[in-house]
Amino acid sequence: MIGYLGTPGALVELSYRGGLSTGTDRPARFSRTMGGKRKAMLGPVGRREWDVSFSLIGSRDTHGLVAVAQSNDSLMWYPADAVAGNMLSPQASGWGSTPANATDAGLVQLPDGTVARSVVAESVVRVGSAHGAYEMVPVRAGELVTVGAWSIGGQHFRGFWRDAAGTSITNWADEATAHLGWGWHQATLTPPPGAAYVELHLAGGMQYARPVVSWGESAVDRPGRGCPASVVHGLSEALTVISQDDAYGSISVTITEVG
């Protein structure tokens, strides 16, 4: 599987094995009233954790991963299901954190039969506030990126292109569309020179569900799987092969979502 790990502006493509080891279950505590009713107290949704191993990598890559694991920096992690699907985090695509200018509208059943959480808003909705004021999704130089979302009444995508430091380069917008009821709309974008990230805003509708940012020519309508903030720990190394050109080994790490 191919994933991307690194600091903002310096994502490295890595072939890895393993996957999600801890989901987003939330703690629950139950009690009974004097009348016999059962009540539940729910804690916050948990953060994800991955057990990941990298096999037969050279000493330079090994050194880089060790440096990453020993740093105190927050890292961006995009596992294979994010790279092939929706690069947004689950919190962004599922409105786990409601934007300041929107209101939680609960679960809705969409025309394709799936269920998603939605928000209503009278103004522009800035997607992704769980890991900061907004969520940036990395883009690759010269390669297309496609955004999408479900909405009621219409859709007008807009946002910002940002450089490796997160500074805005320029804004962008596609053509507005209108429709009755729930509808799906997507727009394919070409990153300008110097762009390292895209930021997505939704407008033109009354209610929104499951925003998507995907690499390539089509928005993959799935829940988000990206992780814009994580730490690497639990490092374990093993030397496998020594050849004339380099020494090769494997590394196992745990990647834990933070924020």
Image (tube, grey):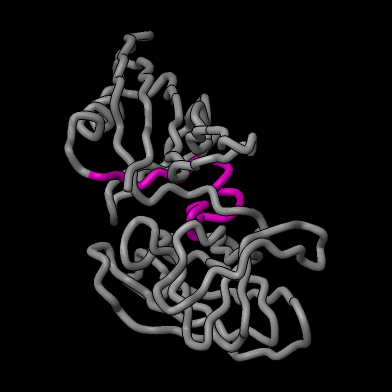
Q: Is residue 196 left or right of residue 39?
A: left
Frontmost residue, 232 versus 83: 232
In the drawing, does residue 162 fall left or right of residue 151?
Answer: left
Picture coordinates of residue 165 (x, y %)?
A: 23, 64
Tell me the residue at 47%/73% (across/down).
200
Quadrant the N terminus occupies:
top right
Residue 86 in the magenta stretch? The answer is yes
Query: With respect to residue 80, does 189 lie above or below?
Result: below
Q: Position of residue 174 (x, y in %)?
A: 55, 86
Choose between 210 and 2: the one closer to the eye: 210
Residue 25 spot, x, y in % from top left: 53, 36
Residue 41 falls within the magenta-colored stretch: no
Is residue 166 rendered to the left or right of residue 144? left
Q: Identify the magenta region.
A: 74-92
Q: Nearer the viewer, residue 73 or 112?
A: 112
Taking 36 as reference, is 68 left or right? left
Relative depth, front residue between 95 and 174: 95
Residue 151 sits in quarter: bottom right
Residue at image location 38% in from the left, 84% down from the top: 171
Instruction: Name the residue furthest front.
Output: 34
Going 43% across and 74% down the picture, which residue do you hit?
126
